[in-house]
Image (spheres, rainbow, N blue to C red):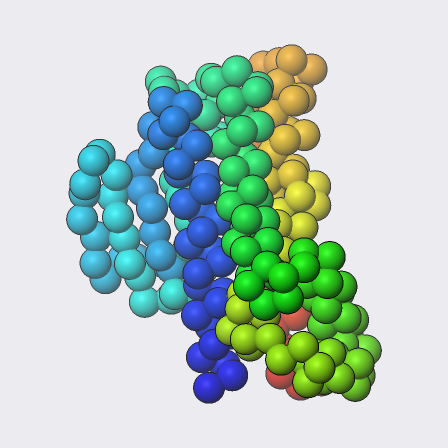
């Protein structure tokens, strides 16, 4: 049951994040090509409102495909003013923060207490010492689904601001380099994003293996 709750919380977090990107892209009149729940070849997809809605077998993940993220295309992201790029990039983080804050208010009626308990939860994972976390859960009796949902959303928001190639935080920096890199901008952007995705997937795999064997 615990793994199922974690899976549902993770999937909801990813969908929320990508929905934020899509919403702001459409508001900024930037073309959205696809919205996928999961990765790889879709088992189900249907085009509605010009967007290809997809569901794939590998549900631990998802993406919103916006036109022109790394290429200069009509109605694409790269050709938009920098402030619009920032709004679209930060929308996913903003939606995750909203979900986390709502979870804190429902569970504890206090945002700062929610942040503190999540911080203790993160420390517990890395130190393998859950005593303080268990004491807090016993005392406050939070809903465990909302606890995980809030924790995963706030973690997703923070990690996406880390300037590692392919995160939202890195795109804020990379897009700002366009006037400096000039004609080399697109090729450098594509190179960094490609290797960023590869490296982050390797790190995710290592973390998942470590979680199961520790």
Residue 203 appears anywhere in the view? no
- Across and down, in percent, residue 162 comes to 70, 45
Direction front: furthest residue: 109
Residue for point 67% across, 21% down:
177
Task: Examine the rendered structure and indicate whether residue 212 appears above or below residue 168.
Answer: below
Task: Examine the rendered structure and indicate whether residue 47 appears above or below residue 113.
Answer: above
Quadrant holding the C terminus: bottom right
Judging depth in this view, the residue of 213 and 145 nearest the camera is 145
Q: Please indicate whether residue 35 sits to the left or right of residue 142 in the image.
A: left
Residue for point 73% across, 57% down:
112
- Across and down, in percent, residue 195 comes to 60, 46
Q: Please indicate whether residue 9 sits to the left or right of residue 193 in the image.
A: left
Judging depth in this view, the residue of 133 and 87 nearest the camera is 133
- Across and down, in percent, residue 135 comes to 75, 84
Q: How many marks?
A: 0
Residue for point 43% across, 70% down:
8
Which image quarter: residue 74? top left
- Across and down, in percent, residue 77 comes to 45, 25
Residue 142 appears anywhere in the view? yes
Which image quarter: residue 52? top left
Residue for point 45% across, 51% down:
16
Which image quarter: residue 51? top left
Judging depth in this view, the residue of 4 and 179 nearest the camera is 4
């Amino acid at each position: 049951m615990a793994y199922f709750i974690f899976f549902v919380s993770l999937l909801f977090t990813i969908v929320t994040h990508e929905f934020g990107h899509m919403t702001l892209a459409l508001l900024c009149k930037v073309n959205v090509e696809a919205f996928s729940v999961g990765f790889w070849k879709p088992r189900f997809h249907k085009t509605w409102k010009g967007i290809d809605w997809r569901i794939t077998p590998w549900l631990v993940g998802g993406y919103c495909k916006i036109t022109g993220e790394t290429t200069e295309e009509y109605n694409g992201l790269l050709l938009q003013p920098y402030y619009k790029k920032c709004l679209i990039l930060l929308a996913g983080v903003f939606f995750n923060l909203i979900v986390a804050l709502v979870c804190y208010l429902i569970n504890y009626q206090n945002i700062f207490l929610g942040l503190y308990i999540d911080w203790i939860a993160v420390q517990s994972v890395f130190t393998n010492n859950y005593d303080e976390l268990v004491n807090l859960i016993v005392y406050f009796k939070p809903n465990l689904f909302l606890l995980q949902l809030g924790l995963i959303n706030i973690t997703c928001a923070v990690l996406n601001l880390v300037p590692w190639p392919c995160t939202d935080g890195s795109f804020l920096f990379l897009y700002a380099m366009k006037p400096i890199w000039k004609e080399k901008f697109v090729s450098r952007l594509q190179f960094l994003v490609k290797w960023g995705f590869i490296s982050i997937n390797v790190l995710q795999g290592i973390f998942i293996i470590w979680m199961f064997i520790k």
